Amino acid sequence: MLMPRIPLPKKHEPIRLIESKTGPRYRVVMDVNQSGAPRKQVTKTFTDPEPARALSAARKFVTETKNQVSNGTFTTPSKVTVRQLAEAWLKSKRDIRAKSVRGYADVLRPILKRLGNRQAQSVNRHDVESLVEWLSTDGGRDGHGYSHRTVVYALGALKQVMAFGVSSGVLASNPAKEVKPPRRKKGDRKVVTPWEPAELLRFRESADRDALAAAWRLSLCGLRRSEVLGLSWDDVDLDAGTVHVGWSRVLVGKGHMERDDTKSPASDRTIRPDDVHPGTMALLRALKAQQAADKLAVGPAYTNTDRLVVVSRLGEAISPSVYSAMFANLCRDAGVHKIGLHTVRHTVARIMHEAGVSPADAAAFLGHTLAVHLSVYVVLTQRGAQAAGRTLGKALAVGQAQGH
């Protein structure tokens, strides 16, 4: 059997032929530094049962590398995986809350399941398009796709990871940059059904009999769950009748809770709960007295070192999931339709909106920006559309009467 002819690189080419027992190899060693920059070289070896094909691949690599160096898009070959790049990106997020970092880690989990072990430089746009399709159709539990919202968040996080790869010199370009999430369908829209004012009052009446009645009053003022759980007695002025919302308490790891800043600067605010729900400060005063009695009864085992308002009878901080479960039970006891704690904020926002409170004032009370309030909390309803139609009809009728 004749051995294939071994072609030789040309003298001017940065390619060397290396003979070995396993066959010929072609090694590229070339400078990749920009003019005037410190010398930097890249090395890559090519093998193939057909030596001519190996040499052709080496020449193609040389040509592509020279073009990339000349136009400034060259990056040194790297074995950094998508998982390693994502972990480095998460570590760099020092300007956001720990809860937000955990949220990013959660939405990246299905991406890393599929692409985590791939070298980041090997991922192209087609891979990302396929990933989005997989997430949307059968990437979730039991072979079902993730929600539209989750897919959008996951793709957004991946785009940031890849952009970090570009800025840190691992990637020449962002393969996810131009990838679009799937179009949102009618069924993808989450329907928020706030309480009517009567339901809120019915819940309040029932929850006032609970040991944490004061906490539920604060939730009914529109405080976020994290804000209620992070509230300290140092933030409560029982004499002045004010509550300062300046902290939050969130889950940042499995079973680990941490007191942190509020969600945003707009969240830092002071409210007067009795203006909304008369008697709230009296309930807070009674809760504080009960905690003092609990501390005496329990002794050294009492653990409320942060002076939190919402704790168990042993002084232990209550976890977000437990607080939500307690809320669900109270909804059942009160005979109102079950909603999530966050939907209470939507309820408060809608009641204020329908009562004529300006969006800016409502946003300040709830602790978010005007833009968020208008885009998220001013809920569009059929009832609102019909009311607007009646008002328009009345205005036209007045105009018609004036015209005659």
Image (cartoon, rainbow, N blue to C red):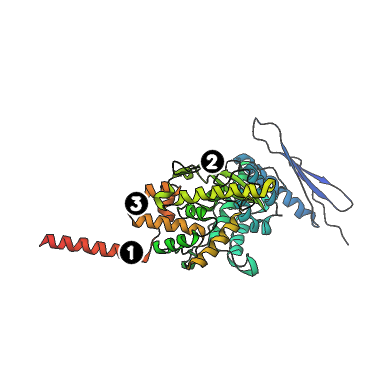
Q: Position of residue 119 (x, y in %)?
A: 70, 51
**Residue depth check, mark 2 versus mark 1: number of the one nearer the observer:** 2
Residue at 89% from the left image edge and 52% from the top image edge: 21
Q: Which kind of residue does numbered mark 3 sit on?
A: Val
Image marks 2 and 3: residues in contact by CB distance under 8 Å: no
Q: Quickly name the residue at label 1.
A: 385
Q: In this rendering, is residue 312 above or below 72?
A: below
Q: Secondary structure at mark 1?
A: helix
Q: Percent position (x, y) of residue 384?
A: 34, 63
* Cα distance in 3D space between marks 2 and 3: 30 Å
Query: What residue sits right under mark 3 in the picture?
Result: 357
Q: Considering depth in this image, is 201 or 57 the residue closer to the camera? A: 201
Which type of secondary structure does the marked residue at label 3 adopt? loop
Element under disc 2? helix
Residue drawn at 76 percent across, 53 percent down? 54
Q: CA distance from mark 3 to mark 1?
A: 19 Å
Res. 48 visible in picture? yes
Q: Of 351 and 67, which appears nearest the observer? A: 351
- Identify the residue under disc 2: 234
Q: Earlier in the sequence, mark 2 or mark 1?
A: 2
Q: Is residue 129 left or right of residue 6?
A: left
> Which residue sits at x=30%, y=64%?
387
- Three-letter residue code for mark 1: Ala
